[in-house]
Amino acid sequence: QVQLVESGGGLVQAGGSLRLSCAASGRTFSTNQMGWFRQAPGKEREFVAAISRSGISTTYAVSVSGRFSITRDNAKNTVYLQMNSLKSEDTALYYCAARAERPGRLQDPDEYDYWGQGTQVTVSS
Protein backbone atom coordinates (compact mmCIF):
# COMPACT_ATOMS: atom_id res chain seq x y z
CA GLN A 1 0.00 0.00 0.00
CA VAL A 2 1.27 3.46 -0.91
CA GLN A 3 -0.16 6.71 0.40
CA LEU A 4 0.48 9.91 -1.51
CA VAL A 5 0.14 13.46 -0.20
CA GLU A 6 0.46 16.44 -2.52
CA SER A 7 1.39 19.96 -1.47
CA GLY A 8 2.57 23.24 -2.97
CA GLY A 9 -0.51 24.34 -4.86
CA GLY A 10 -1.88 27.86 -4.68
CA LEU A 11 -2.79 31.01 -6.54
CA VAL A 12 -0.22 32.49 -8.91
CA GLN A 13 -0.26 35.07 -11.67
CA ALA A 14 0.22 34.08 -15.27
CA GLY A 15 3.92 33.77 -16.05
CA GLY A 16 4.74 32.75 -12.50
CA SER A 17 6.05 29.51 -11.06
CA LEU A 18 5.05 26.89 -8.52
CA ARG A 19 6.63 23.69 -7.30
CA LEU A 20 4.39 20.83 -6.32
CA SER A 21 5.56 18.05 -4.03
CA CYS A 22 4.19 14.57 -3.51
CA ALA A 23 5.32 12.69 -0.42
CA ALA A 24 4.89 8.93 -0.48
CA SER A 25 4.66 6.55 2.44
CA GLY A 26 6.09 3.07 2.46
CA ARG A 27 9.39 1.49 1.53
CA THR A 28 8.44 0.74 -2.06
CA PHE A 29 8.63 4.29 -3.42
CA SER A 30 11.79 3.63 -5.44
CA THR A 31 10.13 0.69 -7.18
CA ASN A 32 7.25 2.80 -8.49
CA GLN A 33 6.95 4.88 -11.59
CA MET A 34 5.38 8.21 -10.69
CA GLY A 35 3.09 10.54 -12.57
CA TRP A 36 1.34 13.86 -12.31
CA PHE A 37 -2.13 14.39 -13.69
CA ARG A 38 -4.56 17.29 -13.56
CA GLN A 39 -8.27 17.84 -13.82
CA ALA A 40 -10.02 21.11 -14.56
CA PRO A 41 -13.72 21.63 -13.79
CA GLY A 42 -15.90 19.91 -16.36
CA LYS A 43 -12.96 18.16 -17.99
CA GLU A 44 -11.45 14.70 -17.85
CA ARG A 45 -8.31 13.96 -15.90
CA GLU A 46 -5.31 14.48 -18.15
CA PHE A 47 -1.70 13.39 -18.09
CA VAL A 48 0.93 15.98 -17.24
CA ALA A 49 4.24 14.19 -16.66
CA ALA A 50 5.77 10.88 -15.57
CA ILE A 51 9.14 9.71 -14.32
CA SER A 52 10.86 6.35 -14.17
CA ARG A 53 11.91 4.60 -10.97
CA SER A 54 15.46 5.90 -11.20
CA GLY A 55 14.45 9.36 -12.35
CA ILE A 56 16.51 9.10 -15.52
CA SER A 57 13.57 8.83 -17.90
CA THR A 58 10.79 11.42 -18.06
CA THR A 59 7.87 12.12 -20.36
CA TYR A 60 5.59 15.13 -20.68
CA ALA A 61 2.31 16.18 -22.20
CA VAL A 62 2.81 18.40 -25.21
CA SER A 63 0.95 21.24 -23.48
CA VAL A 64 3.53 21.46 -20.66
CA SER A 65 6.73 20.36 -22.39
CA GLY A 66 9.45 22.94 -21.94
CA ARG A 67 7.63 24.63 -19.05
CA PHE A 68 7.21 21.85 -16.47
CA SER A 69 9.84 19.53 -15.02
CA ILE A 70 9.27 16.31 -13.05
CA THR A 71 11.96 15.05 -10.69
CA ARG A 72 12.15 12.65 -7.77
CA ASP A 73 14.24 12.11 -4.66
CA ASN A 74 14.07 8.46 -3.70
CA ALA A 75 15.90 9.11 -0.43
CA LYS A 76 13.05 11.43 0.59
CA ASN A 77 10.24 9.39 -0.99
CA THR A 78 9.15 12.51 -2.84
CA VAL A 79 8.36 13.47 -6.41
CA TYR A 80 8.25 17.08 -7.58
CA LEU A 81 6.66 19.03 -10.38
CA GLN A 82 8.32 22.36 -11.14
CA MET A 83 5.92 24.52 -13.11
CA ASN A 84 7.22 27.63 -14.87
CA SER A 85 5.63 30.13 -17.23
CA LEU A 86 2.22 29.22 -15.92
CA LYS A 87 -0.84 29.97 -18.02
CA SER A 88 -4.49 30.33 -17.10
CA GLU A 89 -5.16 27.02 -18.85
CA ASP A 90 -2.91 25.29 -16.31
CA THR A 91 -5.56 25.94 -13.64
CA ALA A 92 -6.66 22.56 -12.29
CA LEU A 93 -6.55 20.14 -9.42
CA TYR A 94 -3.18 18.38 -9.67
CA TYR A 95 -2.83 14.75 -8.65
CA CYS A 96 0.18 12.60 -7.94
CA ALA A 97 -0.04 8.91 -8.87
CA ALA A 98 2.10 5.79 -8.51
CA ARG A 99 2.30 2.52 -10.40
CA ALA A 100 4.43 -0.58 -10.13
CA GLU A 101 6.75 -0.85 -13.10
CA ARG A 102 5.16 -2.96 -15.83
CA PRO A 103 4.26 -2.62 -19.51
CA GLY A 104 1.66 0.04 -20.15
CA ARG A 105 1.08 3.62 -21.16
CA LEU A 106 2.28 6.09 -18.54
CA GLN A 107 -0.13 8.64 -20.01
CA ASP A 108 -3.17 6.52 -19.12
CA PRO A 109 -4.57 7.26 -15.63
CA ASP A 110 -6.09 3.77 -15.50
CA GLU A 111 -2.55 2.39 -15.44
CA TYR A 112 -1.86 3.86 -12.01
CA ASP A 113 -2.39 1.97 -8.76
CA TYR A 114 -2.36 4.74 -6.15
CA TRP A 115 -3.52 8.35 -6.10
CA GLY A 116 -3.21 11.34 -3.83
CA GLN A 117 -6.05 13.69 -2.92
CA GLY A 118 -4.83 16.50 -5.13
CA THR A 119 -3.62 20.07 -4.71
CA GLN A 120 -5.29 23.04 -6.38
CA VAL A 121 -3.36 25.26 -8.76
CA THR A 122 -5.04 28.48 -9.87
CA VAL A 123 -3.40 30.76 -12.40
CA SER A 124 -4.84 34.26 -12.72
CA SER A 125 -4.52 36.11 -16.00
Image (spheres, rainbow, N blue to C red):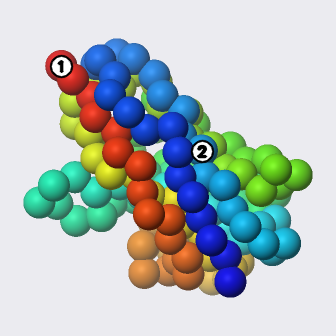
The answer for how far apart the CA atoms under marks 2 and 1 are is 24 Å
- Which amino acid type corresponds to the residue marked 2 in the rendered image? Ser
Q: Is residue 12 left or right of residue 66?
A: left
Residue lying at the far right in this picture: please name it.
75
- Taking the image as drawn, is residue 31 in sight? no
Residue bearing the label numbered 2: 21
- The quarter in which the C terminus is drawn is top left
- Count of numbered marks: 2
Q: Which mark is residue 125?
A: 1
Residue drawn at x 52%, y 59% is: 96
Q: Is residue 27 left or right of residue 79?
A: right
Q: Of discs 2 and 1, which sits in the foreground? A: 2
- Which amino acid type corresponds to the residue marked 1 in the rendered image? Ser
Give whichever of 58, 88 is nearer the camera.
Answer: 88
Question: Which of the 4 quarters of the picture holds residue 121?
Answer: top left
Q: Position of residue 14 (x, y in %)?
A: 28, 19
Residue drawn at x 78%, y 72% is: 26
